[in-house]
Image (cartoon, rainbow, N blue to C red):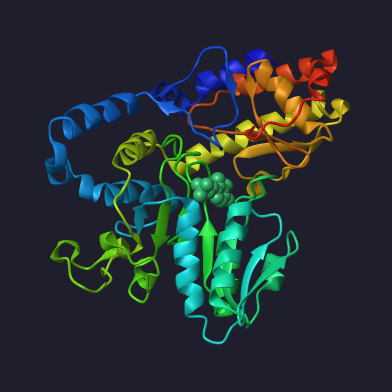
Amino acid sequence: MNRIDCELLDVECRLAGCRERFSLPEGVLYFDGNSLGALPRTTAASIGAAVGDEWGKGLIRSWLDAGWFHLSRRAGDAIAPLIGASEGEVAVADSTSVNIFKLAASLLRRRGGRRKAVAERGDFPTDVYILQGVVDLLGADCELALAEPGGIAEAIDGDTALVLASHVDYRTGALRDMERLTARCRALGAPIVWDLCHSAGAVPVELNRCKVDYAVGCTYKFLNGGPGAPAFVYVSGDAIGSFEPVVTGWFGHADQFRFEDRYRAADSINKLLAGSPPVLSLRAVLDGVACFDGVDMEELAAKSRRLSGLFIELADERLARHGLELASPRDPAGRGSQVSFRHPDAYAIARALIAGGLIPDFRDPDILRFGITPLYMRYVDVWDAVDAIDAAMSGGAWLDFRTDAREAVT
Ligand SMILES: *Cc1c(COP(=O)(O)O)cnc(C)c1O
């Protein structure tokens, strides 16, 4: 394998043209689209029109005339086919953290004598923190049970009232078997909330086929919705009828503009809505999701696996000797859309690479993570990235960053 082979793979790639849907800066190798997706070409104009015309000229009339009221549902319906959901099962609102709260609080409130909320140690911090907060709110007969890494399935039993699990591990990229774990939860009578932050938009997600009832996920990662874009929340058509909202805001009311004295929940996914939606951010979500138009998710995921497989193959040849130890699964079927390595100086290496124009990220304590974004990443980008890491490690460029004080965000 050499650089020309990679160029050929790009020429042959049927998805190569999707890169044109994005505005990418020159001279940057971007491997962090799993933290913040790239900017779609259409986003700036959409937001410009929403500000200049809809807000500037339409003023409050735009809630109806420009469809602002329906943006949460429109964006949800646009995301639905990417995650194997049906129309009407997804809404876009609030953050992933807040949506976890909404689901967990409602499901745990109906725990029917069961005590445990199960998550896995080392899962994304906010997920565990939110669950902790809900458990504390509910009182003494409810507790957080943290399973050891890899042990979540065994930790679920007849005393489990709720399970919260990430589809893809944010550190290693390990992909969980959604169908199997969901079936186990169902058999034991425990609802499971799936966090799709690191899978939606890059890995095939089949919520309906896997009989998933509850899920959440970010739109600013693989879905390219922009910094701080609101998250999506999914409740299946089967589960929505009996879902009792805990965050009972007016946007989730059965008849919002009757201004009734008491809350009555809408009889749709709207009951997951709370307050006024972030209209400008929702416009950007629509642009981000539109980048997937005409893209087959299986084909996209196959490209992701080929890109990450190439990364691993080249890393075996050129990076192992620098002490970079693969932390992601070698089996492509068990891998999400990223390649992670362990190195005791991962932070300094990440800093050095960023200074040189290759953007990965660092995850405490020792993970160097490269996000694979098959919609706009080329095979040559993978080649060039490995080349840049090899050069930085060989030349010792990273050593200069070893004593750097850690910045708040990497
Ligand atoms: C990125 C990510 C989040 C982020 O949650 P926010 O509320 O948007 O800050 C949550 N969970 C997982 C698994 C993530 O990867």
Residue drawn at point x = 64 percent, y = 64 percent? 119
Q: Give above or below for 169 relative to 52.
A: below
Frontmost residue, 97 versus 296: 97
Q: Left or right? Give the position of 209 relative to 250.
A: right
Frontmost residue, 335 versus 128: 128
Image location of residue 73, percent across then percent down: 28, 52
Residue drawn at point x = 71 percent, y = 38 percent? 340
Looking at the rendered image, the quarter that the N terminus falls into is top right
User: Which image quadrant for residue 141?
Assistant: bottom right
Frontmost residue, 173 versus 334: 173
Residue drawn at point x = 47 percent, y = 24 percent? 16
Q: Is residue 180 visible?
A: no
User: Which image quadrant for residue 328?
Assistant: top right
Considering every residue shown, the one lying at the far bottom of the view is 113
Q: Is residue 133 visible?
A: yes
Q: Give above or below for 303 relative to 45.
A: below
Looking at the rendered image, the quarter that the C terminus falls into is top right
Image location of residue 50, percent across then percent down: 23, 32
Image location of residue 57, percent across then percent down: 13, 30
Image location of residue 52, percent across then percent down: 21, 27
Q: Left or right? Give the position of 152 relative to 342.
A: left
Considering every residue shown, the one lying at the far front of the view is 261
Residue drawn at point x = 59 percent, y = 33 percent? 372
Frontmost residue, 174 versus 131: 131
All told, the count of numbered labels is 0
User: Which image quadrant for residue 234?
Assistant: bottom left
